[in-house]
Image: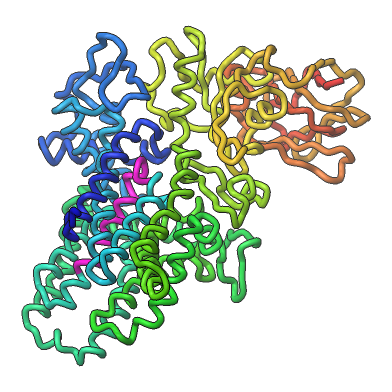
Amino acid sequence: MIRLSNIKIACLLAASFFVIGLVTLPHYGINWDTINHLPRGQTYLHYFLTGERDYSKLAPFKYYWQNPDSLGIDTGSSDQVPKRSLYQFDGTPLNFFLEHDGRGHPPLSDILASSFNLILFNQLGLINDIDSYRVYGILLAASLVGLVCWWGTKVYGKFAGIIAAISLSLYPLFWSEAHFNIEKDIPETVFWSFMIFFFWKGIVQKKVKEIFLSSIFFGLALGTKLNIIFSLLVLIPWLAFYLISNKGTILKNSKMILVLTVCPLVVLAIFMISWPYLWQDPIRGIENFLGFYKTIGLTENIDTNFVGPFHVNTYPIKWIIFTTPPVILVLSLVGLISVLFRIRKEENMVSLLILLWLLVPIIRVSMPGATIYGGVRQIMEYIPALALLSGLGGITLLNLLSKKFNKSAVALIIVLIFIPHIFRLVSIHPNENVYFNFLVGGLKGARQQDIPSWGNTFGAAYRQGVSWINKNAEVGANVVLVNELLPNIPAIFFRKDINYQNRSRSGYLRQGEYAMTLVYQGVGIRSYYDEYLEKFIQPVYEVKVDDTAILKIWKNDDQHLKLNLKENIFNGAKVVKTQQGIRFDLGVVKSLARLEVQYDQGNCQELSSGYVRISTSGKDWDTLVGILPNYWKVSISGPQPFQGSFIEPFVGQNAQFIDLILTPPDTCLTHTKSFKIYVFD
């Protein structure tokens, strides 16, 4: 029988995670925040390596097709692939970021991810331009799996370490986000975890080297995201309890005191050196940096459905309960109970540390006035702690049950109970970050309960849609995103003959474009185009989880109409000026299709802003999505209004009155020469 050392087991599990993660990279699209991060990372990296402030010495980027289903560089032809990344934009030189950076996350992980692209794509040509960045995330996540295994083994036993590593690896959010959330949350979680580990080890074993290493990881984390600051709420209480329990012995160690004094300087140095924006005016730059986090972290707009006693935000804890696999939920609960019995008995107080590590990230976003959105990916730091508790729960059950049953059989059963969960993940792959457990009825139940952000893959699902379009769209097809930005999908993923441009949105004109969108909570009513497609056009492709679509593609033509639409011009409507703009009165309630207006442009003011509202009675009004001037409702028709003409499309809403609320109220659009109102009969 082969017996593996603790370190070998940790390395084996980490390597397994890395290999499987690497192979599955082409299954995931990019994070839709990528466009805000990788161009910056490339610019800073280029400056650090060459001293050049722009890309003028690089050959121009030339578009080519990269097979989205391939990890390697695969153009399907003899196309020459440029030695330059898609994200090395000429329009974002160093001066651009020195002027505009600061109101966002720090750039360290952007730079590190870009270095992986430089080596794996540009220099070695091993992995394609897009996926080469994301090897960084897979490598970091795999290292954390190894750490959790080794640490769990050291403090709770080998079986606990293995269960902890399995729990972390199979945690749906962690597994999925490790593939594409490489700029913020995954790196922050990994750096946070290593920092906690080395600080604990340094204090408990009185090792200066480990304390110093913890400061390096703190600096790496701060250079990625501000969340690491909240780790002090974990470390300071833990350290206080530890000092009291051990009568403050480490305070008598001069080397320990010295390194603890130096650590903040190490952190600050890493943070400052990795962010050139701060070099020009550190105080103002840090003020902008902190102001950004204050804006996104505090709000009064909390969903009232998730306000508990004392105005506590219950959204984070409910999300965690609903998205944690049942096996991990049960094991971690057992581990949590076990912690309560172990805290006073442990000299190293590791269980108290893990408990604080779990609770602090969750509590801080649950406090009155705090907020979180998009699930709990922003506080992923809790996941390694939960995995360690799951490992503790596993060995606790093993010890209890082995008193009556064979220990090896019990251990095997505990491991085997993960198998149904593995099958579950395989069945929804690669959409693990929309996983919901049976407590809420899966993703379908989350949708029915309208849990905020149900179904949101944050860009990961796009790649599946791109692959379908490449295989099924006719030559020269037009492809648009329904309401999203083009950079959400790397243009090189589309066949070279495909026209990927949002100005091809044709709406009611039905000119045959393929329209793709992610589907999640609130999407169906965010724009006219969303409402139009959902109501009138049959999808040609859907990605589903739990019988719930998370991505849809429509072909906007007459052949795919759901309904037999018949438009007719309604005669008899009247138009009058109001104090706020103009009003159209049909006299009766009709199903609206479109309003077309011709107006006089002479001796009047241009439209500054406005919106459209409708009513069946003239008393209760529904405001339509979108503001005027509008450039996107039917992009192919151009901006509205424009050069004496205005078109407002509807999606069959019942109304008698149409109000145009305009600023200024006497704008040119109110000088109506003629109009037509189309209705569905």
- The image quadrant of residue 520 is top right
Image quadrant holding the C terminus, namely top right
- The image quadrant of residue 80 is top left
In the image, farthest residue toward the bottom? 247
Q: How is the image coloured?
A: rainbow
Inspect this view and state whether residue 89 appears. no
Inspect this view and state whether residue 383 appears. yes
Q: How many marks?
A: 0
Q: Which one is nearer the viewer's eye here, 230 or 636?
A: 230
Q: Is residue 196 magenta?
A: yes
Classify 382 as above or below 631: below
Q: Give the left or right position of residue 598, taking residue 518 as reference.
A: right
Q: Is residue 128 magenta?
A: no
> Secondary structure of the magenta portion, mostly?
helix
- The image quadrant of residue 513 is top right
Classify 43 as above or below 397: above
Image quadrant holding the N terminus, namely bottom left
Q: Which one is nearer the viewer's eye here, 488 or 344?
A: 344
Residue 35 screen position, x and y as percent: 36, 36
Q: Give the left or right position of residue 669, taking residue 674 as reference.
A: left
- Residue drawn at x 66%, y 38% is 525
In the image, farthest residue toward the left? 255
Residue 665 screen position, x and y as percent: 71, 36
- Residue drawn at x 78%, y 28% is 652
Residue 276 screen position, x and y as percent: 20, 48
Q: Give the left or right position of residue 639, taking residue 582 as reference.
A: left
Residue 161 screen position, x and y as percent: 29, 62
- Residue drawn at x 35%, y 35% is 24
- Residue drawn at x 62%, y 12% is 511
The region drawn magenta spans 177-198
Q: Give the left or right position of residue 449, taking residue 675 as reference.
A: left
Q: Which one is nearer the viewer's eye here, 120 or 1?
A: 1
